[in-house]
């Protein structure tokens, strides 16, 4: 998914953000449930955990910072490490579906804001909506790279 080459700034930022979102999901492509949970690093980072974390990130920036909902209301953990956690009820398909649902809500929230509008409800607020977009593209792209490396290592080790 390539963002538009020629478009207004908002359309391009939306395109880059959606591309980063799809790259996160692609980290789970073709993995079994066991593979998606496999830890190859000392941290809690796993392919499925990265999508769970990305879901948290979307909610913190759009649902909380822009829409003014609370972490408590959304059931979000306080500790970042906890955002990578999963349990036996989490499946690859379920985690992807939840991420896509949260992203759809984030798009709806963002549609009500101009890029120069302020996100008022983050601990570092106020921040422009443009800043939120650029930050999300950067963060999700970095995590997509992590997911891609983990996926590659898992598939290579399993032959």
Image (cartoon, grey):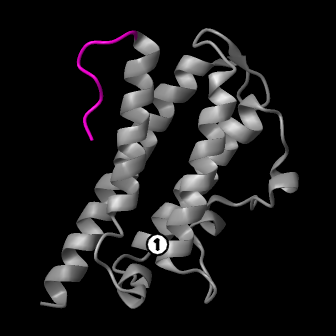
At x 56%, y 73%, the residue is 94
Task: Report the side of 72 relative to 21 (left or right).
Answer: right
Is 74 located above or below residue 3 in the figure? Answer: below
Compare residues 31 and 128 and report the one nearer the observer. Answer: 31
| Image quarter in which the C terminus is found | bottom left
Is residue 115 rendered to the left or right of residue 25?
A: right
Q: Is residue 58 magenta?
A: no
* Res. 114 in view: yes
Q: Residue at x 30, y 29 (%)?
A: 3
Q: Of helix, strand and loop, which one carries label 1?
A: helix
- Badge 1: how crowded within 10 Å, few (<14), some, or many (20+)? many
In the shown orientation, is residue 119 left or right of residue 147?
right
Image location of residue 138, percent across then percent down: 40, 36
**Residue shown at 53%/54% (left/top)?**
54
Residue 149 lies, with reference to residue 85, above or below; the image says above
- The x and y percentages for residue 115 are 57, 13
Which of the 4 quarters of the picture holds residue 146? bottom left
List the residue tagged with mark 1.
48
Q: Where does the image place residue 11, in percent across and percent down from the top left?
A: 42, 19
Q: Which residues are magenta?
A: 1-8
């Amino acid at each position: 998914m390539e963002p538009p080459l020629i478009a207004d700034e908002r359309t391009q930022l939306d395109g880059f953000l959606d591309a980063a979102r799809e790259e996160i999901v692609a980290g789970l492509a073709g993995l079994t449930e066991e593979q998606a949970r496999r830890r190859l690093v000392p941290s809690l980072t796993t392919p499925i955990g990265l999508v769970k974390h990305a879901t948290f990130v979307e909610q913190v920036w759009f649902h909380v910072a822009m829409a003014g909902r609370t972490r408590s209301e959304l059931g979000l953990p306080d500790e970042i490490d906890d955002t990578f956690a999963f349990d036996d009820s989490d499946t690859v398909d379920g985690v992807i579906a939840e991420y896509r649902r949260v992203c759809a809500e984030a798009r709806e929230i963002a549609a009500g804001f101009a890029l120069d509008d302020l996100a008022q409800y983050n601990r570092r607020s106020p921040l422009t909506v443009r800043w939120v977009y650029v930050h999300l593209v950067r963060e999700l792209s970095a995590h997509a790279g992590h997911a891609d490396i983990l996926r590659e290592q898992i598939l290579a080790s399993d032959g």
